[in-house]
């Protein structure tokens, strides 16, 4: 319980005290978008590592050496918890956006950081809006930004099972002509 409280404090402190960094990143982005991508990636990876350390999470990674380094990819994985994003993001070698539920737009500072990191917000109720998100993800991968999606569509809390994958998820790789990197979180 103490670790959960410490993690929440750490997240809130980053979002509040790190808010001036959003302005700095915006300025960097106007001058040098590539530098902004690298600095956002490095900063968020560092924060996520601190949160994982605070939470006491131990990780074992298998097969990371087979992830293509020179091209965008579509990461496809099962979804167990909010920690999935932290655990996967610290391992990506290049700027990577996530497909997140549109409900995440409710959290102002978090939303702003997510947008800085190429996250796209999926309206799961509106098929037309959902298609627009998938098309935006295709544009991202075509422009060299990897995308991570959890095609089960929600967190699955039943051990050793997968929920049915939503079909649109794989259209990103198919239309964007990028490799799929499967991820399994246990």
Image: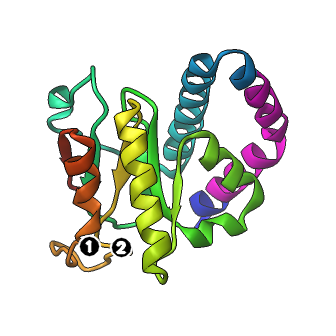
Residue at 14%, 35% in the rendered image: 63
Is 178 left, or right, of 143 in this rendering? left
Q: Where does residue 8 sit, x and y in percent of width and height? A: 67, 58
Q: Identify the residue at image location x=42%, y=78%.
A: 127
Would you place residue 142 above or below residue 111 in this image? Answer: above
Residue nearest the observer in this picture, 181 or 144 = 144
Task: Locate the N terminus by quadrant.
Answer: bottom right
* Residue 79 numbered tag: none
Instruction: Provide the secondary structure element on which disc 2 rests.
Output: loop
Does the stretch in magenta take in 26?
Answer: yes
The answer to the question of whether label 1 and label 2 lie on touching residues, with beta carbons closer than 8 A, is yes
The image position of residue 173, as x and y in percent, is 23, 48
The C terminus: image quadrant: bottom left
* Vertical order, 54 against 64 (above or below): below
Secondary element at tag 1? loop
Where is residue 73, by image quadrant?
top left
- In the rendered image, which residue does mark 1 sit on? 166
Q: Can residue 85 be seen?
A: no
The residue under label 2 is 153
Question: Earlier along the polypeptide chain: callout 1 or callout 2?
Answer: 2
| Residue furthest out toward the bottom | 125
- Give the distance between the C-alpha atoms of the residues marked 1 and 2, in whole angstroms: 7 Å
Q: Give the class, few, some or many, for how many residues have Cα within 10 Å of label 1's Cα (few <14, many ≥20).
A: few
x then y, percent, for residue 46: 56, 31
Q: Which residues are magenta?
A: 6-27
Instruction: Judge whether 93 appears above or below 89 on screen.
Output: above
Is residue 70 visible in the rendered structure shown here?
yes
Query: Does residue 99 show up magenta in the picture?
Result: no
Residue drawn at 26 percent across, 63 percent down = 78
Name the chief secondary structure element in magenta: helix
Q: Residue at x 32, y 77 (%)?
A: 157
């Amino acid at each position: 319980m103490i670790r959960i409280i410490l993690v929440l404090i750490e997240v809130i402190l980053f979002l509040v005290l790190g808010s001036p960094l959003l302005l700095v990143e915006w300025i960097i982005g106007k001058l040098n978008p590539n530098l902004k991508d690298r600095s956002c990636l490095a900063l968020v990876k560092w924060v996520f590592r601190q949160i994982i350390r605070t939470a006491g999470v131990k990780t074992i990674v298998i097969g990371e050496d087979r992830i293509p380094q020179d091209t965008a990819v579509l990461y496809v994985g099962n979804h167990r918890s909010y920690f999935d994003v932290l655990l996967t993001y610290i391992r990506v070698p290049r700027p990577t956006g996530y497909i997140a539920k549109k409900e995440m737009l409710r959290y102002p500072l978090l939303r702003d950081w997510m947008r800085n990191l190429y996250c796209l917000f999926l309206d799961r109720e509106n098929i037309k809006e959902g298609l627009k998100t998938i098309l935006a993800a295709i544009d991202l991968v075509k422009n060299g930004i990897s995308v991570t999606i959890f095609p089960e569509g929600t967190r699955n809390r039943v051990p050793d099972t997968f929920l049915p994958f939503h079909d649109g998820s794989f259209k990103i790789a198919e239309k964007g002509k990028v490799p799929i990197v499967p991820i399994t979180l246990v």
